[in-house]
Amino acid sequence: MDRTTTSQADEFLRRAQADATPDASTSALLTRIADRLSTVRPGGTITEPRRLILALRYATEQHGYGTLEAETAEQELLRHLPPITEPVQRDEYATRIRMVTAGVTL
């Protein structure tokens, strides 16, 4: 591997790590979602369809129905909300979300 390839690989890794950390606005919305999940029926379950609904709901509440900002926020939330492959308890999922906002890769 030559020096250029290593440099390109390092840059790719740097960008991937930067993309893994949500921006301040997205982090704030993720925190609101986590707070809700951990305080309202924390022992209940959450599934993938609910994850999609939460992203839409919180983005719309923050930026208004049908706005470009809401659409962008929804996509960012979906990018950072961990996928749900099987039902999980709400409080456990809230913990996963908090790990994402802290920069922990799941």
Image (tube, rainbow, N blue to C red):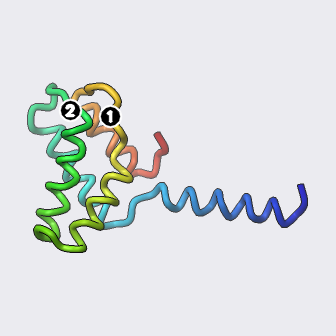
Residue marked by disc 2: 46
Residue found farthest to the bottom = 68
Point 25% across, 66% down: residue: 71
State which quadrant residue 2 falls in.
bottom right
In percent of width and height, residue 73 lies at 27, 64
Q: Secondary structure at mark 2?
A: strand
> Does 42 appear above or below 68?
above
Point 14% across, 55% down: residue: 57
Tell whether 5 sits left or right of 22.
right
Point 57% across, 57% down: residue: 16
> Does 52 appear above or below 89?
below
Q: Nearer the viewer, residue 62 or 56?
A: 56
**Residue 84 numbered tag:** 1
In percent of width and height, residue 48 lies at 26, 36
Name the amino acid, label 2. Answer: Ile
In percent of width and height, residue 82 lies at 36, 42
Q: CB of mark 1 within 8 Å of CB of mark 2?
A: yes
User: Which image quarter is the N terminus in?
Assistant: bottom right
Crowding around mark 2 (Cα neighbors within 10 Å: few <14, some 14 to 19, many 20+) is some
Point 31% across, 62% down: residue: 26
Q: Secondary structure at mark 1?
A: loop
State which quadrant residue 13 falls in.
bottom right
Q: Earlier in the sequence, mark 1 or mark 2?
A: 2
In percent of width and height, residue 4 lies at 84, 66
Name the amino acid, label 1. Answer: Ile
